[in-house]
Amino acid sequence: MRLFEGTEFDIPPTCDRCQQLETDCQCPPPVHEYLPNSRQIARLRVEKRKRGKVVTLVVGLQPNETDLPKLLTSLKNTCGAGGTIGDNGIEIQGDHLTRMTDCLAEMGYRIAK
Ligand SMILES: [Zn+2]
């Protein structure tokens, strides 16, 4: 007897939209809609790293609900600094707390005090 025989898992997966087998489905991938900026709360803080390196962090944004790469690009341009997407959020090199707070507020994000 197969593991899932007679259970719902035994049915080949079909597409929810066109009801075709997933292998035959021609539907375009769903477009992900990000959460509006105004429903996200950003927390900013400056952190000192090894060898005197300082970074400004943006945390608290929901990674799956935010276009983080796009936001990173905007912040890098605003600050004229390098940056990266880390485990906790966005990291921009240097102390840009005020500028980044203004930038995020301008985009409509709520800023945690
Ligand atoms: Zn489909």
Image: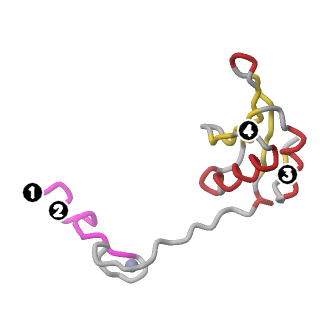
* Residue under label 4: 92
Residue for point 28% across, 66% down: 8
Real-space CA distance between mark 4 and mark 3, rounded to the nearest whole angstrom:
13 Å
The reply to whether discs 2 and 1 touch (Cβ–Cβ < 8 Å) is: yes
Please name the amino acid that badge 3 sits on: Cys
* Quadrant of residue 65 within the rendered picture: bottom right
Q: Magenta segment: does it hold 78?
A: no
User: Which circle's residue, 2 or 3, is located before the other in the chain?
Assistant: 2
Between tags 4 and 2, which lies in front?
A: 4
What is the crowding at mark 2: few (fewer than 14 residues within 10 Å), some, or many (at least 20)?
A: few
At mark 1, the secondary structure is loop
The quadrant of the picture showing ligand 1 is bottom left
What number of labels is visible?
Answer: 4
* Residue under label 3: 103
Classify residue 106 as left or right of residue 74.
Answer: right
Question: Mark on residue 83?
Answer: none
Real-space CA distance between mark 1 and mark 3, rounded to the nearest whole angstrom:
61 Å
Quick one: which residue is furthest to the left in this view? 1
Q: Main secondary structure of the magenta part?
A: loop
* Residue under label 1: 1
What is the crowding at mark 3: few (fewer than 14 residues within 10 Å), some, or many (at least 20)?
A: some
- In the image, the segment drawn in magenta is 2-15
Between tags 1 and 3, which lies in front?
A: 3
The reply to whether discs 1 and 4 touch (Cβ–Cβ < 8 Å) is: no
At which x and y percent is residue 87? 60, 37
Question: Mark on residue 5?
Answer: 2
Please name the amino acid that badge 2 sits on: Glu
At which x and y percent is residue 73? 70, 51
Quick one: which residue is furthest to the front in this view? 80
Please name the amino acid that badge 4 sits on: Ile
